[in-house]
Image (cartoon, coloured by chain):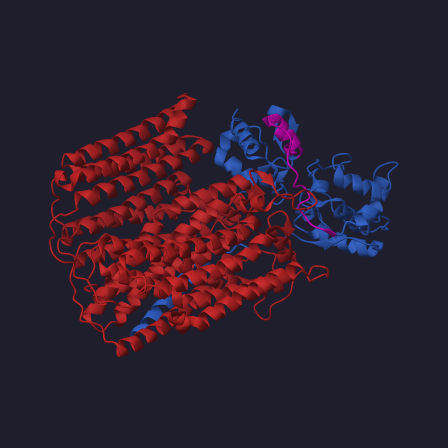
Chain colours: A blue, B red
């Protein structure tokens, strides 16, 4: 009996030590993607409310740069955008202007700001969330006119990760262009002039191939300090390149970027 | 005719009933899909995920024990037949008794898991059943076959205890292992399909989410074979560790020197099996990791560099405990062998090497860190220690750890033996056997290098691969020749030195080449070590066969702390198994079937390591408490039998054996 008790105490102590160590090291949780039911016949107010969720989500990342009722870090304050939008571009309604600003942000850049907004928002969020986002922005001082199209309304649950398709191309130049790297990064060798992410023109001189690979596959593992428009924003670069690039495409890209030293 | 199975009829009936219920449930749910079942149901208090988690993990622990132990029970029985030594037969029988009493609990947890899965996750199980229905029907039938062959194996032990009957008995044991292994392969197909629903590089689903593959493709998915191999080896190691714990408990409670001697020997055998299983496990793990990366780089990165990155630090700690415990047990064990003190001076060096390797292995590489932590570290990697966190260093460390553990075993093995006899006395068969083993080792070592050679020696890394592996092969040949000339011990050191050199060379050279080339280096490190283990063991067997004994092994003269080491080994192994179960499932993140069937339940997020540690700890304690209780029940029956028929007086003596000299004992049936 005494032996059994000693062994039991020993076993519990060992298990407690291991579990204790496990709780002491950094605790990371992998969240599920946010799921919004954007479907059916929704009123403007309902759509705008769903759009608020999209606006505040890490997936859209709007608040990384924009402010709402305060000046944004890198981009305009969006309070009152619903009323301003109709006057921003000649011939465009508020809805058209906001949509254009979301899917083609460099078409009309507010004076005093650079075009640093990702051009991959439609790819990331999908059409239903974009429409909800427009509704929310219209509701900021304006009338919500946008509605879900029949296709969007029948679309059901909208989840993240819209851009899970593969990337075409075999050469480094093709991969860089088709993966959308040029939208955010400056890469002199291919004539890209993006200003959202770090300048990659000489990335091979400061990062090892391993670090470049890590930056492509897990962009938020290490955030570069300097971007053309200030501190580099986390959460902007898509995290699905590990699925979209084939192994050989990834290695081609790493090799190409690693060679950019001068 | 069937009178001899009566005492266990109840247990058989319970197992049969559970299996049939599982089968009925599977078929029932699959054919009742006209209605719209809820996507999820909630389990009270602890939630569905934790309920399934605990049922699955405890079932897996029991199943691993049930699959691992029959493998070495069969081997030990075969050794007993070959050596005609009764104690091996008794040991095999005692191993089998342990799985016999654990069988019903394994079945009960299997049935509980099935119920929970089909009731709490009906949609997911329905999707899985669409693909795997034939195997889900086959599974309970195979389980029945396994249970029947287990009982047949156990209850026919006396009846088939004749030279001719033993062959049949071995065949039944083999069938038991075959059924068990098939069961594991089927279950592995289900779980690996959820991880990697692709085969031959092609996805098995179209863009609309419809299954487009065949059952064969679904089973032979990207991670099926790596998991099969990994689990097969891990089950043996785990079974050995649990048997070691059982023996330690019996040793601590033993009242006679005879019992202590027997359970000391049994504990030694359990530790030996655990170590033999442990040594190839890292290789199997790397194979699995490579296939995970091959299937999805994102999944690979999530596993090693994403939110699971800190898990591997914990894994390194647990494996370090296992390696150190296993070595420490061998070092203590040398104390009961006359002549063991000759090697006492080497222990501090072995410990130093192991400690350094453990520290390297536990060095983080690219864990997720906060900007503040990055600032404190001075970048993504530590300026000094970061260099040790990469795979080049870790591969080198683990291979050196394996070589060091092997060296401990080698010292233990020859501790009680004097100088080897001249090799000429070993006969022609020994010479032929050594040549064959050396030939196989050389082929193993050189064949990948030859493939590189055929592609051309266009760069230094290719020359290094070919040159070093050919050199290693030549060293094995030279060691064999030296053995023939009675310089076998020197030959062994040459092989071990050559393997260590290959490991360290590729470890250091890995820092100077691209990742794609560096990954390939691990193959040469593994092959150098594996061939060294095989060749050195073969030489050692013939070198010390018939060598004069320096004295009897004092079985039973082991300190109490050695028994606690065996218990520590088993607890750590069990915890590690739970941790790897969490890792295997967490890499799917919010997918039931990766990228195909999304988890939309409230439990779709992957929990933190701390939370996982709590659940794993509960599973480990539950498993150990249950198996302890089951063993205690088995012992009650044994005591009753002992009262009815007192055992013959046993002697504690040493005698040479195939595994290791052990005490000759009276039958412990």
Nearer to me, B628 or A131:
B628
Horizontal side of B323 relative to B142 (left or right) equals: left
Question: In the image as oriented, which residue stretches furthest toward the right?
Answer: A91
Please determine whether, in this image, residue B558 is positioned above or below residue A64: below
Residue occupying image coordinates x 24% and y 55%: B330
Q: Position of residue B465 (x, y in %)?
A: 36, 29
Q: Total label count?
A: 0
**Residue A69 in view here:** no
When asked about the image quadrant of residue B441, the answer is: top left
**Residue A38 in view here:** yes
Nearer to me, B492 or A223:
B492
Q: Position of residue B176 (x, y in %)?
A: 41, 57
Residue occupying image coordinates x 66% and y 34%: A180
Q: Quadrant of the N terminus of chain B?
A: bottom left
Q: Is residue A168 magenta?
A: yes
Magenta part of the chain: A157-183
Q: Position of residue B112 (x, y in %)?
A: 54, 66
Question: In the image as oriented, which residue stretches furthest toward the front?
Answer: B1
Nearer to me, B651 or B524:
B651
Horizontal side of B648 relative to B283 (left or right) equals: left
Q: Position of residue A57 (x, y in %)?
A: 68, 51
Q: Is residue B123 magenta?
A: no
Q: Quadrant of the C terminus of chain B?
A: bottom left
Nearer to me, B159 or A2:
B159
């Amino acid at each position: 009996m005494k032996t059994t008790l000693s062994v039991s105490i020993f076993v519990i102590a060992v298990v407690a030590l291991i579990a204790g160590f496990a709780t002491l090291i950094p605790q990371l949780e992998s969240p599920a993607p946010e799921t919004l039911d954007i479907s059916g016949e929704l009123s403007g107010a309902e759509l705008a409310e769903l759009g608020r969720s999209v606006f505040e989500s890490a997936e859209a990342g709007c608040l990384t740069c924009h402010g709402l009722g305060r000046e944004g870090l890198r981009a305009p304050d969006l309070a009152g955008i619903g009323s301003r939008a109709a006057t921003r571009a000649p011939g465009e309604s508020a809805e058209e202007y906001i949509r254009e600003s979301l899917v083609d942000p460099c078409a009309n850049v507010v004076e005093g700001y650079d075009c640093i907004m990702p051009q991959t928002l439609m790819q990331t969020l999908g059409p239903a969330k974009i429409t909800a986002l427009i509704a929310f922005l219209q509701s900021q001082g304006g009338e919500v006119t946008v509605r879900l199209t029949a296709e969007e309304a029948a679309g059901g649950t909208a989840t993240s990760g819209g851009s899970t398709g593969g990337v075409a191309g075999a050469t480094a130049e093709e991969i860089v262009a088709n993966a959308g790297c040029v939208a955010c990064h400056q890469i002199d060798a291919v004539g890209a002039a993006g200003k959202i992410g770090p300048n990659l023109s000489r990335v091979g001189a400061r990062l090892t191939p391993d670090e470049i690979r890590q930056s492509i596959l897990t962009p938020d593992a290490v955030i570069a300090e300097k971007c053309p428009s200030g501190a580099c924003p986390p959460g902007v670069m898509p995290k699905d390149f590990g699925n979209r690039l084939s192994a050989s495409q990834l290695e081609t890209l790493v090799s190409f970027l690693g060679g950019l030293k001068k | 005719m069937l009178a001899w199975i009566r005492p266990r009829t109840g247990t058989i009936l319970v197992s049969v009933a559970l299996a049939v219920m599982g089968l009925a449930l599977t078929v029932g749910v699959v054919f009742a899909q006209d209605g719209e079942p809820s996507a999820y149901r909630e389990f009270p208090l602890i939630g569905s995920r934790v309920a399934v988690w605990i049922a699955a993990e405890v079932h897996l622990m029991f199943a691993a024990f049930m699959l691992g132990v029959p493998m070495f029970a069969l081997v030990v029985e075969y050794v007993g037949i070959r050596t005609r030594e009764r104690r091996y037969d008794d040991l095999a029988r005692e191993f089998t008794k342990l799985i016999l009493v654990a069988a019903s609990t394994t079945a009960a947890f299997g049935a509980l898991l099935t119920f929970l899965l089909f009731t709490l996750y009906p949609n997911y199980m329905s999707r899985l059943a669409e693909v795997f229905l034939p195997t889900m029907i086959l599974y309970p039938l195979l389980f029945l076959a396994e249970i029947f062959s287990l009982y047949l194996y156990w209850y026919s032990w006396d009846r088939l205890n004749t030279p001719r009957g033993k062959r049949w008995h071995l065949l039944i044991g083999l069938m038991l292992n075959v059924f068990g292994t098939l069961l594991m392969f089927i279950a592995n197909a289900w779980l690996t399909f959820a991880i990697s629903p692709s085969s031959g590089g092609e996805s098995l689903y179209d863009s609309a989410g419809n299954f487009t593959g065949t059952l064969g493709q679904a089973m032979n998915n990207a991670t099926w074979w790596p998991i099969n191999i990994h689990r097969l080896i891990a089950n043996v190691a785990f079974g050995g560790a649990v048997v070691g714990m059982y023996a330690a408990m019996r040793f601590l409670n033993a009242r006679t020197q005879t019992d202590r001697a027997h359970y000391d020997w049994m504990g030694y055998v359990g530790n030996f099996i655990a170590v033999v299983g442990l040594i190839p496990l890292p290789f199997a793990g790397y194979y699995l990791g490579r296939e995970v990366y091959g299937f999805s780089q994102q999944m690979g990165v999530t596993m090693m560099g994403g939110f699971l990155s800190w898990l591997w630090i914990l894994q390194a700690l647990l494996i370090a405990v296992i390696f150190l415990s296993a070595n420490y047990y061998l070092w203590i064990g040398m104390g009961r062998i006359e002549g063991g003190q000759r090697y006492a001076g080497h222990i501090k060096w072995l410990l130093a090497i192991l400690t350094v390797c453990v520290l390297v292995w536990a060095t983080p590489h690219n864990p997720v860190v906060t900007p503040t932590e990055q600032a404190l570290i001075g970048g993504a990697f530590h300026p000094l220690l970061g260099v040790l966190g990469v795979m080049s260093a870790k591969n080198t460390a683990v291979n050196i750890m394996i070589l060091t553990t092997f060296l401990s075993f080698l010292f233990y093995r020859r501790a009680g033996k004097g100088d080897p006899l001249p090799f000429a006395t070993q006969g022609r068969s020994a010479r032929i056997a050594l040549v064959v083993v050396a030939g196989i080792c050389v082929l193993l070592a050189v064949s990948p290098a030859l493939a590189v050679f055929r592609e051309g020696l266009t760069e230094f890394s290719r020359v290094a691969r070919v040159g070093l592996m050919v050199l290693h092969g030549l060293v094995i040949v030279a060691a064999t020749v030296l053995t023939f000339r009675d310089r076998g011990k020197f030959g062994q050191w040459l092989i071990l030195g050559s393997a260590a050199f290959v490991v360290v060379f590729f470890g250091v050279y890995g820092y100077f080449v691209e990742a794609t080339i560096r990954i390939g280096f691990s193959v040469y490190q593994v092959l150098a070590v594996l061939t060294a283990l095989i060749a050195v063991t073969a030489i050692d067997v013939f070198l010390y066969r018939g060598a004069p004994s320096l004295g009897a092994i004092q079985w039973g003269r082991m300190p109490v702390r050695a028994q606690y080491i065996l218990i520590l080994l088993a607890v750590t192994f069990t915890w590690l198994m739970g941790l790897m179960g969490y890792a295997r499932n967490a890499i799917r993140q919010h997918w039931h079937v990766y990228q195909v069937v999304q988890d939309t339940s409230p439990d779709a997020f992957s929990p933190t390591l701390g939370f996982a540690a709590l659940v794993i700890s509960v599973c480990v304690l539950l498993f150990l408490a249950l198996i302890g209780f089951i063993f205690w029940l088995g012992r009650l029956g044994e005591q009753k039998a002992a009262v009815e028929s007192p055992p013959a007086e046993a002697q504690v003596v040493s005698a040479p054996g195939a595994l290791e000299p052990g005490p000759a004992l009276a039958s412990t049936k």
